[in-house]
Image (spheres, helix red, strand yellow):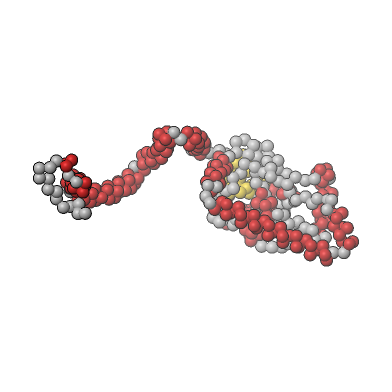
Amino acid sequence: MDLHKPVDFGNRTFDELSQEEKWRVEHQKMHEKHEGHDKMHAEMVMILIFTLVAAQVLLIEWKKRHYRSYSLITLIALWIIPMVLCLKNRWWRFVFIWLVFSCITGLIMQKAMRKPIKGTTPRYIHKYLLNNLLLLQEYFPFSIIRNELNQNDENNQLSKKKVQFIQENSKKTPKTLDKQKAHQDTSIQQISCNDISDSEDENQIEDQPVSNTSIEKDEDKQLDEKEVQASQGNFKRTPKTFDKGEFIKSKFLVEMPADFYQFWEYCKDLNNDDPSDALKDMSLKLVGPYDVLAGKFSDIIEPSSEQYLLHWRYYYDIPEFQTVIKGDDSSGFHIGYFRDTPNDKPVFMAKNSAEKNGEITCTGDNIFAAVL
């Protein structure tokens, strides 16, 4: 059937035409109605492409010339558009979650924009962002794969431990097994950072290991027991002599700047017997990595890697802050280096009073400027 063939009406009306002729008439009317539309569609595509390019150019120029208004308006649009769509479609659950999320984010932004910023604010921001990332990743399929892989790793490790336990026990004599069973009734406590440092600061971080009740009553007895266990090989000891700069870099995971060592030499000139107390008249004492230079880490029971990182870290100290000088214990005053990442050199020296407000304040470019 040729739909483009013209229809000869003659003296007939539309109702008198055959079904095939009616289809041809309707097809011809449709072509007459849409005549020239193909050209119009091509023009519309060209206009769309031009509009997209022009809009991108205008947005880039707007961002370059008026960044504040660009950021404000785009932020408002990103907040309003999802809200309008959800209200229109009556997605009330999303509206509620969106409002709660907006309120919490606004509170975090208010804390972050305060001047001076509080010492606890970076911790809140890090936790908030981390929780958001953990929440988002649960919506992706790889969370199921990750959980399955973790479960397989745990099963493999458990199997290896069982095999190792069976092999070790098969080699032991009954007398050795009796001694091991009797020894399991006594728990070995982890070493507190106060075993390394000669000062006990109540403002240090509360994540320090807790000692046994009997050991707390008799600290000398505790040290004697650990020395005996160290001599039996239960505890590893640090070497007597070592490269102190490399020791700090490997244990504290940071590289100290040149002024750190220069200030130690300056304090040695003031008090060669005990450079850590050279600033005693100013109620200041060198702590933290300076304990390595003072020899307090030589030939002692090897602490855990976490205890090195927690050494002289106060409870509200952020990860970027590293204490090197302590002041009055009642106020929790301390001075330290502030670096953006562990691999970078310190950006500036900062001070903080843990018992007052916990606010971190810049106090100089180097340790000499901060103290003197």
**Residue at left 40%, top 34%?**
88
Residue at image coords 21%, 46%: 19
Which quadrant of the structure image shows residue 67? top left
Q: Using the rendered image of the protein, determine whether residue 156 is visible from the camera's viewpoint.
A: yes
Left or right, 51 with reference to 186: left
In this rendered view, identify the residue nearer to me: 268 or 350: 350
x and y percentages locating residue 109 in the rendered image: 49, 38
Q: Position of residue 231 (x, y in %)?
A: 82, 60
Residue drawn at point x = 54 percent, y = 55 percent: 344
Q: 82 left or right of 236?
A: left
User: Where residue 7 appears, x then y in whole percent?
Assistant: 14, 48
Q: Is 305 left or right of 38, judged from the image as shown?
A: right
Rendered-image quadrant of the N terminus = bottom left
153 relative to 281, above or below: below
Q: Is residue 363 visible?
A: no
- Note whether 118 is above or below 20 in the view shown: above
